[in-house]
Amino acid sequence: MTIVAHERFQSPADAPDYEIDRVSPVGAGAAAITLKGLEKSFGGNRVLRGINLHIPAGQFVAVIGKSGCGKSTLLRILMGLDAPTVGELHFEDAAGKDTQANARIVFQEPRLLPWLSVAENVVVGLGDKIDKRVALREAEAVLSEVQLSEKTGDWPSQLSGGQRQRVALVRALVSKPGVLALDEPLGALDALTRISMQELLNRVWRELGFTAVLVTHDVSEAVHLADRVIVLDEGRVALDLAIPHPHPRRHGNADLAELEGRLLAAILGSDGGH
Ligand SMILES: Nc1ncnc2c1ncn2[C@@H]1O[C@H](COP(=O)(O)OP(=O)(O)OP(=O)(O)O)[C@@H](O)[C@H]1O
Ligand SMILES: [Mg+2]
């Protein structure tokens, strides 16, 4: 896919603390994320109860856990859409300095603007720095790569759910994010569309090298896409599991199925190893 910043990739060796052999490059704008002692309460409801995490730049992390365990709350705090009650959140650049990352979020529902065309929706977040006609041409090129070239002039209401979600993902990607947060972005899609969107996400992540945090209910999706899967349980990290397999991954791999089993056991609270 040529959305893209092919420029200025760092070598994987520049990414500190990276436990897994990374075959894909880390993107120049990718930020590391550090959470220290993060807590969030809504009234007396302690939703996040001390999260400590370091996510190296360019890592793909999936966050799974039971409904209501605090996944969306964690993402909202990462995105600056909500403030923690206690604790710290930092984005760091490659030199380890605090930075303002270009952070984008994709939600389960596409949230397109109904009064703008598909192509205009894609460029809407790019601001004034880019010439609108140039941006629209780029949007059209990218849309054709996700099989939407026929739809660039349509209204969002004329698209199917899966097509709309592709537009929402493309909109986040054209801004060349340093950090991409995804809150169940594929949850409403049928199985086949879901798999093709997973492939798209994986391919673009390998090309752009942003830091990704994906919340999903689907353990198999987590294991298929992520370098590392975090299980949240009652506001704490119950399991932090590396998935040390090269990308792209094949569905049905036996080693991945074994990791999937461990994660399921952890979610269900019967993980013998932990
Ligand atoms: N703005 C809010 N005000 C009050 N309580 C909230 C608010 N947002 C979330 N909560 C509470 O925080 C808890 C965690 O919610 P959150 O949306 O983070 O869960 P989740 O893990 O994303 O669940 P799901 O898998 O169902 O999306 C829930 O008990 C919810 O009621
Ligand atoms: Mg949620």
Image: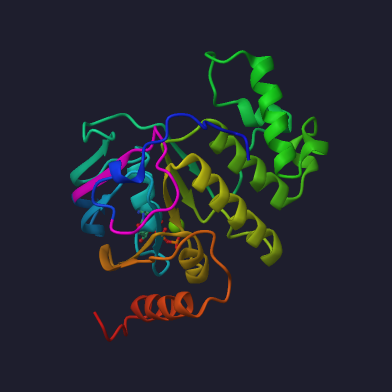
Q: Is residue 134 above or below residue 5?
A: above
Residue located at (30% from left, 47% from top): 56
Q: Is residue 133 magenta?
A: no
Q: Nearer the viewer, residue 188 or 205?
A: 205
- Residue 12: image x %, image y %? 35, 45
Q: Quadrant of residue 211?
A: top left
Quadrant showing the C terminus:
bottom left
Q: Residue furthest right?
A: 150
- Residue 204: image x %, image y %? 55, 45
Q: Nearer the viewer, residue 230 or 243?
A: 243
The residues colored magenta run 19-36
Q: Nearer the viewer, residue 204 or 77?
A: 204
Quadrant showing the N terminus:
top right
- Classified by dominant secondary structure, the portion drawn in magenta counts as loop
Ligand 1 found in image quarter = bottom left
Mark yes or no: residue 113 visible: yes
Left/right placement of residue 181 relative to residue 190 reads left
Q: Nearer the viewer, residue 52 or 199?
A: 199
- Residue 162: image x %, image y %? 70, 52
- Residue 93: image x %, image y %? 28, 33
Mark yes or no: residue 111 visible: no
